[in-house]
Image: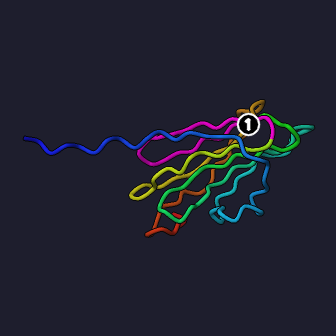
Amino acid sequence: MAAPSSPPAAAPTSSAIGGVNGGDDPAQVKGSEVDTSWVGSDAACSAWLDDNGSGALAGVLNTSLGQSCIAELHRSDGMAYTLRASWGAAKTSSVPDTGYTMWICVRNANNSSDEPCSPHFRMNGSTPVRQ
């Protein structure tokens, strides 16, 4: 009889949160924040990784001045999750990172050519480390 396989990890979910500046987020993984460019009247969108100390990371997307923003949270096994927000911010549920690297990319919904991505991070125990 074959041993039961472990179920696949649950897909991330996201929820709206109040707008927050990455520098004011105490759970922000330092060095993971990325911002879009300020072009004409378009304000910047920003995104970063959050660490809850458990070996799992979350993605945060923050809008600026009511801009429509999109962020994509990536894990090195091919998992990707898209966050969208037009006001305030959005945050994903925590995604297990042990054995993988994770990063986040962000863009203004009206400008798909400007999509900067954060450096890749992996977990060293329960501490995120830049790759």
Q: Residues within 10 Å of mark 1 (few under 14, many from 20)?
A: many
User: Is 31 within the magenta?
Assistant: no
Question: Which residue is disc 1 drawn over?
Answer: 85
Front-most of 37 and 100? 100
- Left or right? Give the position of 70 relative to 56: right
| Residue 66 picture location, percent across and down | 86, 37
Q: In this view, does 110 lie above or below 123?
A: above
Task: State which quadrant residue 41 falls in.
Answer: top right
Quarter of the image for the N terminus: give it: top left
| Magenta-colored span | 69-87
Q: Which amino acid does label 1 sit on?
A: Ala
Prevalent SS, magenta region: strand
Front-most of 110 and 84? 84
Q: How is the image coloured?
A: rainbow
Q: Is residue 97 above or below residue 127?
A: above
Q: What element carries label 1?
A: strand
The residue positioned 72% from the left and 39% from the top of the image is 107
The residue positioned 87% from the left and 38% from the top of the image is 42
User: Is 75 within the magenta?
Assistant: yes
The residue positioned 61% from the left and 57% from the top of the image is 50
The residue positioned 51% from the left and 53% from the top of the image is 102
Front-most of 97 and 16? 16
Residue farthest top in this picture: 110
- Left or right? Give the position of 12 relative to 6: right
| Residue 12 picture location, percent across and down | 52, 41
- Left or right? Give the position of 26 relative to 79: right
